[in-house]
């Protein structure tokens, strides 16, 4: 009887062990199958994001064609190709005290620069940042907003100090960087088309923003002339040119993206005014709205666009700028988690929250060089609440970062080459080396090293021998200082000094 019980016990134990082994084998097979799906989704995404040189050259050509169309007539292209009325970029000869006001988000900045001409350049530079209260940003009136700005400007002017010198009898002059959609009417006037970036203030749309600021400054007892109204990209171009006479264009690669460049005035068919003395005109491209059948748009991009606040618009921006790269990553990870069990049988609820993965977090994961990808693991845990990610999972995340970033950087490079082609600077002429510098501002370019390196390498791929004469230069805080420099180059006293 005892032997029988022992025998049954052994058989039962063997059956249990056998059952566990089968379960483990099935789970391994399932995991292997699921992992195959993850890799298939990755491969499919990689193929759809591909940017071979041939495709990039087509994108560059399409950008050039759209530039011509946008210069020919209003609404002639997806690129607005806005005339900035800036026909005198700083030369370095500018002297005197100039102010700048930079409004483009929840903070605005006031600054002053003392310019000392060719020898001394920027002698002194002071900046103050002011936070705009929510009740002023939304639901207030034009007077409330511009009175708030003018009061802060008045307080800043009151602290001028002895290092800043305004010649006797001269009016202070200011450059106004206003980074909202504006229909420019002259160098120092423009009407607001619409508010963006969380601003919603009645009575300003359709009004001349310089006129509104001037009235508020008068109410504050300030005698200040607005010499130039510019957007941040044009300001960056001015700042870049001041530091380097070879600067021909500026690109913003940050939360958003845009480009501006110097065009020959006679090459702008839609310009009906007198040709400027300089023969040049700065064009604000608004290139974020570029689109072309050659852009490698995936279903993730299409869904992001449909669910965005501006569907059908800014397609290029949604593929290359810092606002969206992290969101594209989130969308791909979400699909992998739902359809291929990327995080085992767990789909993190946080992964379903739009824009929870910011591009700086994506950059930190992409730059992780530790053997076990510890930074990636920590980001997954802290942001998405994935408690135990494996090295295999983390490697997939890094690969996705690489695909998304490479596509964005390479498309950015193609856009820059499109501008160079329009200006005839994409090839070497008779061995001549015509140096062309592109001033670039924005945290995406400045801080996302792999993005920046990829962009620079792609420029070499696309330009061949001509790449040696093209320089991509970081222009830190070009927009603010650039506005003050444009106030100087468009000063009412310039002609007096020249005569």
Image: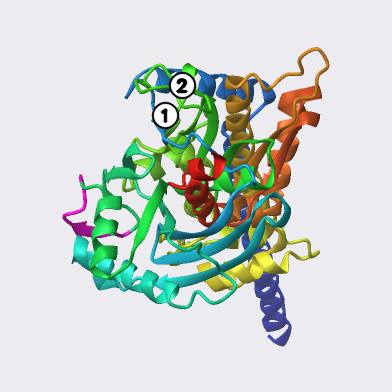
Q: How is the image coloured?
A: rainbow
- The answer to whether 84 is drawn above or below residue 292 in the figure is below
Residue 312 position (above or below residue 33): above
170 part of magenta stretch: no
x, y percent for residue 397: 63, 54
Describe the element under mark 2 as helix, strand or loop.
helix
Name the magenta segment's main secondary structure: loop
Question: What percent of the width, then of the height, locates residue 393?
Answer: 65, 58
Q: What segment is highlighted magenta in the picture? A: 198-206
Q: Neighbour class for label 2 at 10 Å: few (<14), some, many (≥20)?
A: many
Residue at 60 percent across and 72 percent down: it is: 163
Q: How far apart are marks 1 and 2 (CA)?
A: 6 Å
Q: Are marks 1 and 2 in contact (CB under 8 Å)?
A: yes
Residue 208 marker: none
Q: What mark, if any, has residue 79 been given in the picture?
A: 1
From the image, tell me which residue sits under label 2.
66
Mark toward the start of the polypeptide (1 vs 2): 2
Residue 471 in which image quadrant: top right
């Amino acid at each position: 009887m005892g032997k029988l019980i022992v025998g049954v016990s052994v058989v039962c134990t063997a059956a249990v062990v056998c059952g566990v082994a089968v379960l483990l084998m099935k789970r391994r097979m399932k995991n292997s199958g699921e992992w195959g799906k993850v890799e298939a989704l990755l491969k499919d995404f990689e193929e759809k994001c591909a940017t071979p040189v041939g495709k990039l050259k087509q994108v560059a050509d399409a950008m050039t064609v759209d530039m011509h169309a946008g210069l020919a007539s209003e609404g002639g292209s997806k690129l607005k190709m806005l005339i900035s009325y800036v026909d005198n970029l700083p030369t370095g000869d500018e002297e005197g005290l100039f102010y700048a006001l930079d409004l483009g988000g929840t903070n605005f900045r006031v600054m002053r620069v003392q310019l000392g001409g060719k020898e001394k350049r920027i002698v002194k530079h002071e900046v103050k940042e002011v936070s705009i209260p929510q009740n002023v940003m939304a639901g207030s009136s034009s007077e409330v907003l511009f009175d708030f700005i003018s009061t802060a400007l008045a307080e800043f002017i009151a602290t001028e100090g002895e290092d800043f010198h305004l010649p006797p009898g001269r009016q202070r002059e200011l450059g106004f960087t206003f980074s909202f959609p504006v229909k420019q009417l002259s160098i120092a006037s423009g009407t607001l088309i619409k508010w963006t970036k969380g601003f919603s203030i009645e009575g300003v749309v359709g009004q001349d923003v310089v006129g509104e600021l001037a009235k508020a400054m008068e109410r504050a007892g300030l005698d200040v002339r607005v010499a130039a109204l510019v957007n941040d990209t044009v300001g960056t171009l001015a700042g870049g040119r001041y530091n380097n006479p070879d600067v021909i264009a500026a690109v913003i690669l940050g939360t958003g993206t845009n480009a501006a460049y110097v065009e020959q005035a006679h090459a702008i068919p839609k310009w009906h005014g007198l040709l400027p003395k300089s023969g040049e005109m700065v064009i604000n491209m608004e290139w974020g709205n570029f689109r072309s059948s050659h852009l490698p748009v995936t279903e993730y991009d299409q869904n992001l666009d449909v669910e965005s606040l501006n569907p059908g618009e800014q397609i290029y921006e949604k593929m290359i700028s810092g606002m969206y790269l992290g969101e594209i990553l989130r969308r791909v990870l979400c699909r992998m988690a739902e359809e291929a069990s990327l995080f085992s049988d767990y789909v993190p609820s946080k992964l379903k929250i739009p824009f929870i993965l910011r591009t700086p977090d994506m950059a930190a994961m992409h730059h992780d060089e530790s053997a076990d990808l510890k930074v990636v693991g920590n980001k997954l845990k802290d942001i998405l609440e994935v408690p135990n990610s494996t090295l295999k999972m983390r490697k997939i995340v890094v690969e996705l970062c690489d695909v998304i970033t490479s596509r964005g950087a390479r498309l950015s490079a193609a856009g820059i080459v499109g501008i160079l082609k329009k200006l005839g600077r994409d090839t070497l002429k008779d061995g001549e080396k015509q140096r062309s510098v592109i001033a670039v501002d924005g945290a995406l370019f400045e801080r996302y090293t792999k993005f920046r390196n990829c962009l620079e390498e792609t420029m070499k791929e696309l330009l061949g021998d001509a790449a040696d004469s093209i320089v991509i230069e970081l222009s830190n805080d070009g927009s603010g200082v650039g506005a003050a420099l444009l106030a100087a180059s468009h000063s009412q006293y310039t002609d007096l000094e020249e005569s």
